[in-house]
Image: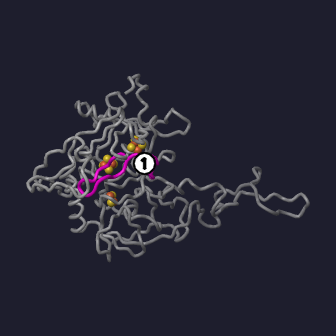
Amino acid sequence: MTTTSGKGPSGAGGGSQAPRSGEVDGAPEADASPNGHGGNGNETPGSGPGAGEGVAPLARTDGAGAVGVTIADPAGARPGPAERLAGGPVMLGPIRRMVTLSLDGAEARVPEGSTILEALHGEGTAEQADTPTLCWAPNMDPINACRVCVVEVEGSRTLVPSCARKCEDGMEVRTDTEKVRHSRRMVLELLASSVDMDQASDDVQRWMSGYGVDPTRYGPPAAPAAAGERDRRHPGHHPLPDGSTAATVAQPVKIDNELYVRDYSRCIMCYKCVNACGTDAQFTFAIAAAGRGFDARIATEHDVELPDSACVYCGNCIGVCPTGALKSVAEHDKREAGDWHPDEETVTTTVCSFCGVGCNLELHVQQGEIVNVTSPSDHSVTHGHLCIKGRFGFRHVQNLPEA
Ligand code: SF4
Ligand code: SF4
Ligand code: FES
């Protein structure tokens, strides 16, 4: 499945495709955009540097030569690639100064505005590019909530989140110090001691094992909360821990609609769903963080059930959730029944047939049945996000009864 690149217009960028060094300062080559796509797709033909090439001014019929605005003459001769390059690099995006920084002692050059994580993805070694992340996604603006991606920066009093901190000229970044490793281990360990991480991605499992995470050292998990009990907690009224068990967010799964479940025993409060429902994609604002401290949780307005909320069931929150807290009812039921087979899953990319927008769909198929639908995060139309029809409207393909 495609996991690269970024969301284009915001310039968040797919760090793994950040441009290589070698560009001229202040004049990046054609593919030197932050997302490595040769521009972010927003360039308008004929605008920006180089506009006017291949555009012939209309001659006045009174013999006075070319005057006024120039407009394209479709029959005019257009210069070839060699002529266009004769004057220097062809610039297709905004000019971005290159900044030079050090990644564990090795010099790296990246376009100004790149985050440290983008520099690590694009210019770093395989180990540096494998910086753990939980609240970051290539198709979202940095959220900066989990702090598992921290690195040391010379002169900075505290560790800094690499997913959000911009590179600066002369910056010295260290990614594998004892302080960094200890901090990442603590983040993962505290999360794993209070949240069910069993369905987090293979990468997360690998990071937890690689950093020596041992959540059991906080004691056995405390008893789960009753349905709705955590939702009724008020700031300042957190029950004291008993000292012998580890507090957790365990609680029953919320199933109040036919399309997706909310299993907040698995929620790490990364805020991805909130931002996907809000300003990153959907602009519906059906969910937000409620409560404070350990009682913080994701909730609908006034904690109403989803059908009574503003939710439009686009499922974009499901698409970005890193731990399996949000998933389709179909996936939930299959997992509960022991009928979930991720090792056998194939993914086929196609185009949604519901309307003319042309969203790319990834059909996740297990044992001959479509079990989920997603969209590639680097697709220029969807940036990984879909509507209710694309994400959930697939049962008719197999003549299955609608949910
Ligand atoms: S399904 Fe869409 S509208 Fe509903 S909570 Fe998730 S992101 Fe918001
Ligand atoms: S439900 Fe998922 S996406 Fe939302 S805050 Fe929790 S872990 Fe993050
Ligand atoms: S991934 Fe950087 S703060 Fe969460």
Span highlighted in magenta in the image? 278-300
Compare residues 362 and 28 and report the one nearer the observer: 362
Check if residue 282 falls in the magenta segment: yes
**What percent of the width, then of the height, locates residue 131?**
31, 59
Report the label total.
1
Mark 1 C-beta closer than 8 Å to ligand 1: yes
**What percent of the width, then of the height, locates residue 161?**
33, 64
Identity, as a three-letter code, of the amino acid under mark 1: Phe
Ligand 3 quadrant? Answer: bottom left
The answer to whether 84 is drawn above or below residue 287 in the figure is below
Question: Can residue 44 be spotted in the picture?
Answer: yes
The answer to whether 44 is drawn above or below residue 162 in the figure is above
**What percent of the width, then of the height, locates residue 393?**
43, 31
Q: Is residue 54 left or right of residue 277?
A: right
- Residue at figure coordinates x 56%, y 36% from the top left: 356
The answer to whether 103 is drawn above or below residue 59 in the figure is below
Q: Farthest bottom residue?
A: 155
Check if residue 375 falls in the magenta segment: no
**What percent of the width, then of the height, locates residue 327?**
32, 39
- Residue at figure coordinates x 44%, y 59% from the top left: 18
Compare residues 221 and 251 and report the one nearer the observer: 251
Q: Quadrant of the C terminus?
A: top left
Q: Farthest right residue?
A: 62
Badge 1 marks a residue whose secondary structure is: loop
- To which residue does mark 1 refer? 285
Q: Quadrant of residue 77?
A: bottom right
Question: Can residue 1 be spotted in the picture?
Answer: no
